[in-house]
Amino acid sequence: MNGKTFESSMRSRYFKQRLFFGAVRLSALVITLALLGILAYILDNGFRAVTWEFITQPPTDSMTKGGIMPAIVGTLYLTVGAILVALPLGVVSAIFLTEYAKQGALTRIIRIGVNCLAGVPSVVFGLFGLGFFVVFLKFGSSILAGALTLGILILPTIIGAAEEALKAVPQTFREASLALGVSKWNTIFRIVLPSALPGILTGAILGVGRAAGETAPIMFTAAAFFTAVLPKSIFDEVMALPYHIYVLATAGTHIEETRPLQYGTVLVLIALVLGIDLIAIIMRSMFRRNKRW
Amino acid sequence: MVTVEKDFIIRTKNVDFFYGAFRALSGITMNFEKNKVTALIGPSGCGKSTLLRLLNRMNDLIDGTRVEGEILFEGRNIYAPEVDPVEIRQRIGMVFQKPNPFPKSIFNNMTYAPKLAGIRDSGEINALVEESLKQAVLWDEVKDILAKSAMTLSGGQQQRLCIARALAMKPDVILMDEPTSALDPISTAKIEELIDTLKKHYTIIIVTHNMQQAARISEYTGFFYLGKVIEFNGTEKIFTNPDMKQTEDYITGRFG
Amino acid sequence: MKTRKNILTKRTEEIAIRNLFGFFAFLSVLLLGLILVFLFREGLPLFKQISVADFLFGTAWYPTYDPPEYGIWPLIVGSLVVTFFACLIAVPLGFLSAVYIAEIAPAGIKEILKSVIELLAGLPSVVLGFFGMVIVGPWLQETFDLPTGLNIANAAVMLAIMAIPTISSLSEDALYAVPREFKEASYALGATRYETIIRVVVPAALSGISTAVILGMARAIGETMVVLMVAGGAAAVPGGIFDAVRPMTASIAAEMGEAPFRSGHYHALFATGIVLFVITLAFNLIADTISNRFRETGSGTL
């Protein structure tokens, strides 16, 4: 190969590289701008609607005025309920998968089950919640039914996060404890679990964020169009932020009139969900930095 | 009790060990004398650490392994179905290659296992901590910082803490898996000194890469090669006049 | 030495704990079965009224007419069409951004971009649906002079935003898992970074990337709120990308509230749920098989 053809071939090779890198950078830019665009637009429009009254008052004038306090409270109930269901179940499952299970058919089936559960569409969870909790177990449309449905929805997330956290605990910790004649259960409970706790909590928080933003699973299991009073028991229906947005934006005759309320509600929901995610992300990087092993 | 002139605390009889289909140890028969130091030497992958981890059933933790033959601890087969590995590990302690303190305070590292074994009285616990740390010649260095994290100690101190932690369980045997290979020469010397004092009360079985170390600290030495015991003899004999040609080749540095 | 009885109870305790944990771990599988059972329980009665073939391939979805018609073919087509166009956008963007994060971006930007992707994944679907309604819809309507901006194109864009994080983060994991030695070998032979990425890294990560794409598609096809709010809601087989459609998920979510309890309509919506469940289950099993086969054989296909 003489110098000239080598040079021109290099030029065309680098040209391809520049083209490709350009496309790659552009895609990253597009994604970033999409996120920023959405956030900026919602922030800009929702900012004026969100006042102290908006957050602390119930809706008035057939939901064309007033605030969204019952929806905030309802979302909190549903979310807390979901995590109460999913966290213990998820952690126990993860402990079994990482600490007890041997490679084999059972583990394989459980893993496939968890993966498939993660892939079930949220509206199908809604149908299941309706068929099982609302109808079959006669919970009715209620906080209980909604929280259980959401809990199952986020279960795979929690299992995944907990498994990852448990796997990150050095094997030497387990060996050190077992070699001292400590039982397997005590080793898990007193050494492995505490070491994995930050990671598990981070996963739980991400699960909370996910649960707080879901609409379809609670549409038929828990969410009410409008409630004048706050729920008194777990068998009451509740308003919820995501469902409230959907209702205001699509139903009724005041869609244009209630735009400010819609923007405000969207902003509150985003602040809640992304705020929760951000806490988890920050927590995680903090724990990574302070890792003691 | 069998009448033998020596008191053997652990005896292995024709032990084979498999990782899946791979035979890691074959036909291991060894007697470990009480209150003596026995060193296991040999090139990497020869099975010496594997044998060590069989003696307190640590290999139970690895999936797909299988043990054949008998390992008798005080005359009882530790692999018999009714034996609880947890009890075996309480009586046969272990120190690992890399110091592995828990990310807890020094004090809690010491009390972790004794508390779980049922010692509740705080006076008794405190006495045990002090006694064990003194035995491990660490007391003077840490007595004022017991509440500090064990992770703040130096590598050599961490390893002595791990030894002290094992001593607090009052084991009969201490297994050491290359305990100084991650340490500097000064810390190594301290640990070797420590081993020398500990053998009055404990049986010590130590795996080491370092032949000088084996020669310095042990009464007996077993030479492993390719999953077999080539020669098991008094340390002095092994290093001055071994029975086997392979042993001589190894200790004179001709291979390994 | 402790009494034998004490030791025995301790060991039974350990075994009991293990089995209890195993049971709870198995609960995920049980739940999956339970979901199927209850979908069938509420969905199967429909097939006393119409045949499975009429249900799946019937082109008329008039569940509230008298007599009602329960053909979900337009809904299935609606789901597939929006998913297809969403993937047309999300696969290149997700894949390329993963390449950027895994191979090209400097450390600082990489961290930021990973957070961006994570936050994007965290955006509630109802928020994206809302955004599609109030911004993308009117813009499409004006720009292309359409009767409505709520259509396939709108749904595809918003769905793509939902699928990008899945595709991007899973592809990135796959790219990361490619051993450094491969890249070094390629560089040492005089390949450029581009050539190394395209001919060595991406092929080695291909099964992971395929898994990512399949799971992204599953995410898009199962997504509800976005298509409910921006796909336009017409239960007809579309003729172009500016036509409105009514994907299966949207139909279930929109109509379940009005369907009388255990009416034909109610059963038909559950039966639609079965179809949806089976499709996404198939996607997930395929993804699982691909990633599992990869784990066993390594990157022998390179």
Image: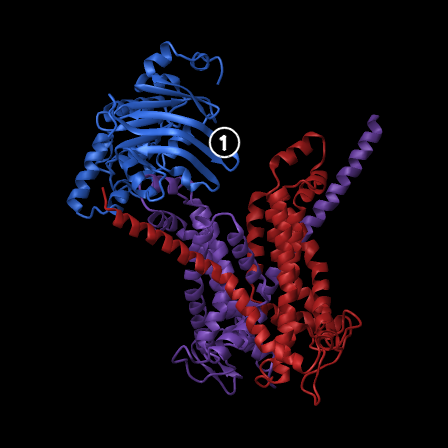
Q: Foreground: B27 or B223?
A: B27
Chain letter of disc 1 in the image: B
- Figure check: C72 above or below A34: below
Chain identifier matching the purple colour in the rendered picture: A
Name the residue furthest left. Answer: B123
Query: In the image, is A36 to the left or to the right of B249?
Result: right
Q: What colour scheme was applied to this rendering of the protein? A: by chain
Q: Foreground: C35 or B108?
A: C35
| Image coordinates for residue C267, horizontal then vertical, percent | 62, 80
At label 1, which amino acid type do we have? Answer: Arg
User: What residue do we see at 49% from left, 68% from top?
Assistant: A150
Q: Foreground: B66 or A165?
A: B66
Q: Colour of chain C?
A: red
Q: Quadrant of residue B186?
A: top left
- Figure check: C32 above or below B190: below
Name the residue furthest bottom. Answer: C66
Chain identifier matching the blue colour in the rendered picture: B
**Number of on-image labels:** 1
- Figure check: C172 above or below C87: above
- Figure check: C129 above or below A59: above
Query: In the image, is B8 to the left or to the right of C236?
Result: left
Q: Mark 1 sits on what residue?
A: B23
